[in-house]
Structure formats: structure tokens, C-alpha cells
Amino acid sequence: MLELKPPMFYEGCEKKLEVIVDRGCPNLRHLGADFWQRVVHCADAMIVSRMSNDDCDAYVLSESSLFVWQDRFVMITCGETVLANSLMLFAKEIGQAQIAFVSYQRGKELLPEQQLSHFVDDVAKIKTVINGQSYRIGEVSQRHHFLFHSHKQYQPGSQDCTSELLMYQIRGHVSNYLRQPQQKNCEILVLLGLKDLLPAFTFDDYLFSPLGYSLNGISGSQYLTLHITPQESGSYVGCETNLSDAHLVQTIFVQLLKLFDPKTWDVIGFNATLNLPRFSVESASCCLDIEQGYQIEFNYFEASANGRLLIEKL
């Protein structure tokens, strides 16, 4: 019997790829928009908007975002995209020997049976060009994430950190507004309040039809990206930034948590420790140190979280 998707369902849970190249590699920004369009197309997505400054090119995609710096790129996609295909094209065009570090991350989808690939499929494909290790972080019966990282020796800089806030089953007046047929970009920006918290940032946002919203913000080499899937059948908000100011990141995340009032949420830090208020809920956490010098902290919050979180080498 054919299993139908819930009405207006869209898989907001995201996949994330970060690739860092060796110093001898050409400037990735000089590869041009056409090259990155091909990389994005391989994942079955499109570039819908772009902005740049002296340090970074930021692309809003039909499924989330892409950021390109001189020596690295971060690509985030949602829906039924196959992000591993983008890495395959990049490795073929640039040469796998030029790649210093790869991190591939994927969350637990609401409807994994609807995906065109699964984490084990992605890793099998990636390992044909990049050796590495994969993990499941989190309890298998609860929210968990999958992570692959390359084995090649690499050490991150002191400011190389990333913080992620992933919210599920959002509620409240902001969520209700995002489900209305009449929405405006400018009103969403005001509701989010990010311009006030990040006055030095330039923002580029995109309102999808019939529902959905993406926002990129950049200042120098710093970025913040936000993606909202408001559909009640699978509502999700993902926010990520490489800001090194932990207090500022905590302020942003707390503001978003108050705005969206999620039933569950994850906080993931790569060399970033965040002490968020518990909002009177139970939580569980775990930490993973990988050989390249990244400490990865995973925190899962739920209204009634029982059980424990595990790290299991796959």
C-alpha cells in the first residue's frame, strides 16, 4: 500500500557539508557562480539569490544555503536533496588531493523513507574519494544526528567554530504568521529581530511560495543563516553561525527559542560551548572529540526527555 505524505509536508531537516582545501588550492571564490551553480545542481537544488563582501559569497538556495570563502565552503540543503553528489563533483573538479578536511552532517528526518539516499549510502559514495569515520550522535530512539569526517591530518584555527540551533514543532504568533498566505520579507525580518542583534551584518532573504523562508547574513568572514519550514505537518527552523562571541550566539539562540517556542530542539557546537537556559525542560547531551581538533557537543532538549544520549562508532 502506497504511503502518502502528510498534506503540505516538506522535509525541513537539513544536511550539511563543509569542505576545507589546502593552502595551495586556487581561491574557491574565483571559481565563479557558474561553477557553484553546477555544484548546487548536483544536489538537486538551485541558486535563487546571491550577495558578497570582501571575504565571502553567500547564496540562498531553493533548499537552504551555500557560503564560499577563499579556502572553504559550507553547503546546507533540505528536502530530498543528495548533498553527497555535490561533494563528488567538487572533488572531481578540484582534485581530492587538494581537500584538507571534510565534514558531512545529517539529522534524523521525519520521513526518511521519502529520501533519495540515506546516510550510509552517502558515506559509501563519499568514501570512494575521501577516507573517513562516521558516527551516530544521540539516542537512536530519540533525536540524533549522523556525522562523517575525513581522516586526513588537519588542525582548525583558534576562531574556527560553528554553532547550530535546530528547532522542531514550532509554535506561537511568529509561526502562525509564517503559515498565512499573505507574508512579507520585511515583516519577517522585523519579527526575527536579527538586524538589531547584528547591526554590522548585511542580510539577504527569500520568501518561498506557498510557504518557507530562508535568510543569509554576512559580515566579513562571519555568517549566520536561518531556514524556516513552517508547515505544521513537519515544522522546523534551523539556524547556524560561525560567530565566535559565545555570549552573542547565546543571545541570538535564546531570542529564537522564545519566538518559535519549539517542542524539541538540538544545539550542536563545533569548538563552541553554549550554556543555554533549560526553559524548565529536561535535556541530555554528549561530546565527541575528533582527531582533527574539533570538539563536537550535541545537546537534545525535549519537554519530557527520558533516556540517555550515546555516541556510537559506525
Image (cartoon, rainbow, N blue to C red):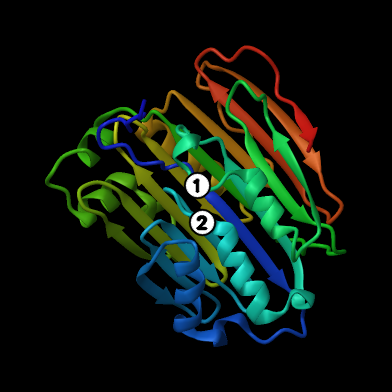
Q: Name the residue under label 2.
A: 76
Number of the label disc, if any, that sits on residue 14: 1
The local secondary structure at tag 1 comes to loop
Q: In this view, does 253 lie above or below 41?
A: above
For badge 2, the amino acid type reads Ile
Q: Is mark 2 on a helix, strand or loop?
A: strand
Estimate the x, y position of residue 241 in percent, counting from the top left: 55, 54
Q: Which residue lies furthest to the front in this view?
A: 1
Q: Is residue 161 at least partly visible in the picture?
A: no
Which circle's residue, 1 or 2, is located before the other in the chain? 1
Q: What amino acid type is highlighted by mark number 1? A: Glu
The residue located at (50%, 39%) in the rendering is 166
Q: In this view, does 214 lie to the left or right of 118?
A: left
Q: Do the residues labelled 1 and 2 touch (CB within 8 Å)?
A: yes
Q: Where, by quadrant of the figure, is residue 61 drawn?
A: bottom left
User: Quick one: quadrant of the N terminus?
Assistant: top left
Counting other residues with Cα less than 10 Å from the Cα at mark 1, is it few (<14), some (14-19), or many (20 or more)? many
Between residues 217 and 7, which one lies in front from this camera angle?
A: 7
- Establish if 237 lies above or below 306: below
Query: Residue 129, percent across and down?
Result: 74, 66
- In the image, is residue 282 above or below residue 259? above
Q: Compared to 85, does 241 lie above or below?
A: above
Q: Residue at x 64, y 48 (%)?
A: 121
In this image, 173 relative to 240: left or right?
Answer: left
- Residue 114 horizontal side relative to residue 28, left or right: left
